[in-house]
Image: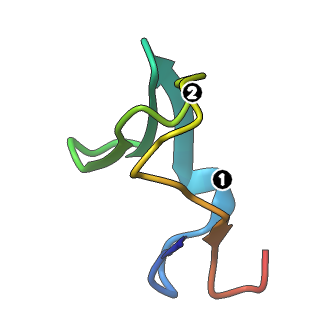
Amino acid sequence: DAIEFASDILPGDIVVTRSYDDLVLALNGSADKITVSSYFSNDGDNAYKLDEIRFADGT
């Protein structure tokens, strides 16, 4: 699975944080965010797997 950001969002626009076992990708200067639940869970049975985070510039 992948998250792909729109062409007007650059890698420097995203603030990456951890909240407990969740991965949070927030748009700097905005209330907009994506939360990947249980991303850091060690149970091995995570239904919310994430292989890639992509930007329009190829990053």
Quadrant showing the C terminus: bottom right
Count up the numbered dots: 2
- What residue is at 42 percent from the left and 12 percent from the top? 20
User: Which residue is outermost to the right?
Assistant: 59
Please determine whether, in this image, residue 9 is positioned above or below residue 31: below
Q: Is residue 37 left or right of residue 9?
A: left
- What residue is at 67 percent from the left and 67 percent from the top? 52
Q: Earlier in the sequence, mark 1 or mark 2?
A: 1
Percent from the top left, x then y, of residue 43? 54, 25
User: Which residue is outermost to the left?
Assistant: 31
Mark 1: few/some/many CA within 10 Å (<14, 14-19, 20+) = few
Name the amino acid type tagged 1.
Gly
Q: Circle 1 is placed at which residue position?
A: 12
Instruction: Identify the image quadrant of residue 22.
Output: top left
- What residue is at 52 percent from the left and 24 percent from the top? 41
Mark 2: few/some/many CA within 10 Å (<14, 14-19, 20+) = some
Name the amino acid type tagged 2.
Phe
Percent from the top left, x then y, of residue 56? 63, 87
Mark 1 to mark 2 CA distance (whole Å): 23 Å
Q: Point out which mark residue 40 bears.
A: 2
- What residue is at 56 percent from the left and 36 percent from the top? 16
Percent from the top left, x then y, of residue 34? 33, 50
Percent from the top left, x then y, of residue 45? 49, 40
Instruction: Identify the image quadrant of residue 25.
Output: top left
Q: Is residue 30 left or right of residue 21?
A: left
